Image (spheres, grey):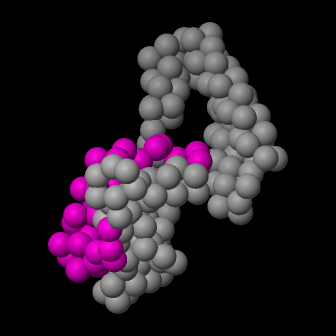
């Protein structure tokens, strides 16, 4: 994910300061990793340096000055180009869960591999239930879309895990050859 482009997108409709941007990120992308304040402000500095945003004013609501930023024309163009660029479908699988399961299949016995798959499957099911509940009380289309996206990926993982569990007899044959 490009934090700079994400912040540009959040600035598309109105000027905002760093705290508002962090809150908007966390509420619009509820299943994403929370965005640290330091990363918000460092990214705003780079965006301003690159001419993609500019200060739009400041206020002091009982605390330190809060500088609001707005997108420049160059920022709108950069956001448009980023949104129009097609992401290359991942050619390689990654992630700790996948690696752990493959290692269990290669380095362990059938029982260990089955336990690893079953434990991971149970964790996925719990997360799917949480996301389904989140979706039912979602306040925005962005929250619903984020939950749907996560559920679809978890569902794909679950189908892969089930297929792998179904193939464990073949694993025994491979390991004993």
Of residues 149 and 171, the one nearer the viewer is: 149
> Is 142 situated above or below 115?
below
Question: Which residue is located at x 24 percent, y 56 percent?
Answer: 42
Outermost residue toward the left in this view: 49
- Give coordinates of residue 163: x percent, y percent: 70, 35
Question: Which residue is located at x 33 percent, y 49 percent?
Answer: 63
- Give coordinates of residue 137: x percent, y percent: 79, 47
Report if residue 157 lies within the magenta region.
Answer: no
| Magenta residues (range) | 30-58
Question: Splitting the image into 4 quarters, where does residue 76 fall?
Answer: bottom left
Residue 107 makes an appearance in the image = yes
- Give coordinates of residue 101: x percent, y percent: 52, 26
Outermost residue toward the right in this view: 136
Is residue 172 left or right of 58 when viewed as pictured?
Answer: right
Question: Splitting the image into 4 quarters, where does residue 170 fall?
Answer: top right
Question: Which residue is located at x 20 percent, y 76 percent?
Answer: 50
């Amino acid at each position: 994910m490009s934090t700079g482009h994400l912040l540009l997108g959040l600035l598309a409709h109105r000027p905002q300061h760093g705290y508002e941007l962090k809150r908007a990120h966390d509420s619009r992308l509820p299943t994403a990793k929370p965005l640290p304040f330091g990363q918000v402000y460092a990214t705003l500095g780079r965006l301003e340096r690159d001419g993609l945003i500019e200060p739009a004013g400041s206020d002091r609501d009982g605390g330190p000055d809060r500088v609001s930023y707005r997108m420049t024309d160059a920022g709108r163009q950069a956001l448009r180009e980023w949104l129009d660029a097609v992401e290359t479908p991942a050619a390689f699988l990654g992630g700790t869960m996948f690696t752990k399961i493959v290692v269990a299949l290669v380095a362990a016995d059938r029982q260990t591999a089955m336990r690893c798959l079953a434990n991971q499957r149970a964790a996925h099911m719990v997360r799917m239930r949480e996301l389904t509940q989140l979706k039912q009380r979602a306040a925005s289309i962005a929250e619903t879309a984020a939950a749907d996206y996560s559920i679809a990926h978890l569902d794909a993982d679950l189908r892969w895990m089930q297929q792998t569990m179904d193939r464990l007899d073949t694993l025994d044959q491979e390991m004993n050859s």
